[in-house]
Amino acid sequence: MSNLHFDSYDDLRFSDAAKDRLTRAVAQGVASSRPVGSDDRGAAPLRAPVRSGKRARRPFAVAVAAAAAALAIGGAAYATGAFVTVGEFAADMFGGVADTQVVDSIGHPVEASASSGGVTVTADAIIGDRENYAVVYSIVRDDGQPFDLLETTEDGLILAGFDTYDADLGMNNGSNGSMYFYDADPADNAIQMVDRCSIDVSGGSIVGKTMRAHFEGLYAYGADDTMVRLADGTWDLRFKVDYEDTSIDLPAGQDVSYNGLSGVVKSARISPIALTFDLVVNEAMDWEEQSSGKMSDHNSQLVDRFLNTPDVVVTMRDGSSVIGHDLGGGTTEDLGDATLVHKAVTFDEIVDVDQIVSVAFCGTDVPISE
């Protein structure tokens, strides 16, 4: 039985309403977790170089480190093969991991900050469910001056990034996601970054894990795509992933149809940031063996067909709709004549699950009973 994971390199798309509501909902009340001199701010939504399931440090890309089985030592969980240094071990054992306080379902890391090169990076807030999270970081100039020469897209996203950004939960699991930058207040000394990620946890949960976030070298693009160096430094943060999982299970058994495939919904659940579902597709993937690391055209077409699902449409009680775009990724499992497809589709804005009327995905419409 095979289990395949694939990553996405699609861009995020945001409506004006999503800009207003996404991180405003995530980051409410984050002032208590900011360093002195920083402001409370809401959010608007960059382009999303995404993460792979392997440990990597490559420019302009997001990477999640791969780790092997967790080893419990003195009450702290460590992953063999996760490149945990002696310094990291000591920091975690002697209070180097910031606690996270949960207020109104949202986690607020306490004093999860690092300063280098005249800039302070702080983890402000995190929200999510068992296998999906969105975390908001603030990036503050220590001299109190605003960041200059920041180009933005039509959606108000800053064309910025880190030379390296690793987000490691110490799990040897496939993942996919996206990140973007924005400036909530161009007159102040901070910009914001949002990192969204879906991780295949195989029935487990990411809640309670330790996030190790590593940043190197902050840059932006100026006029004519010239690179502007904003700060040279290294920032390392460690904090507990903690929030209230407010996801609800949806009815199963509905017929699905997409990309010429048919099947049924095995399970589905929806949270404020994502729809996660398992489909039993009535067709085998017919995966061919590959001698090289490059995916063959045949296998690439299979990935597109089985794992690229249509947009998810969430209908709310007030008649409005929230769209979930497939950022790629997912897993498949060979069932013989059928294929189990596991997907997580994240939303462009925070969804109040209590106000959902129905969820439409893969050719089926699932009503939510009151």
Image: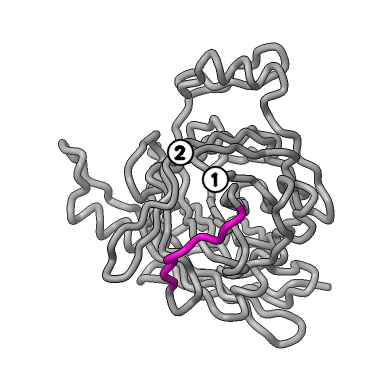
Q: Residue at x 64, y 39 (%)?
A: 113
Query: Is 216 left, or right, of 345 in this rendering?
Result: left
Query: Is 205 left, or right, of 329 in this rendering?
Result: right
Q: Is residue 240 magenta?
A: no
Q: Residue at x 28, y 62 (%)?
A: 226
Q: Is residue 260 visible?
A: yes
- Residue 164 placement: quadrant: top left
Magenta stretch bounds: 144-152
The answer to which of 326 and 217 lies nearer the viewer is 217
Q: Residue at x 60, y 37 (%)?
A: 114
The answer to which of 94 and 262 lies nearer the viewer is 94
Q: Is residue 334 visible?
A: no
For mark 2, give the secondary structure.
strand
Q: Residue at x 54, y 50 (%)?
A: 198
The type of residue carrying mark 2 is Gly
Residue 281: percent from the left, percent from the top? 44, 59
The type of residue carrying mark 1 is Val
Residue 197: percent from the left, percent from the top? 53, 51
Q: Is residue 68 above or below residue 21?
A: above
Q: CA distance from mark 2 to mark 1?
A: 8 Å
Q: Main secondary structure of the magenta part?
A: loop
For mark 1, give the secondary structure.
strand
Residue 299: percent from the left, percent from the top? 24, 52
Residue 47: percent from the left, percent from the top? 42, 63
Q: Are marks 2 and 1 in contact (CB under 8 Å)?
A: yes
Q: Is residue 151 magenta?
A: yes
- Residue 333 placement: quadrant: top left
Mark 1, other Cα within 10 Å: few <14 / some 14–19 / many ≥20: many
Query: Which residue, given by chain and number where applicable, does mark 1 sit on?
Result: 119
Using the image, tell me which numbered label, if any, was put on residue 233. Answer: 2
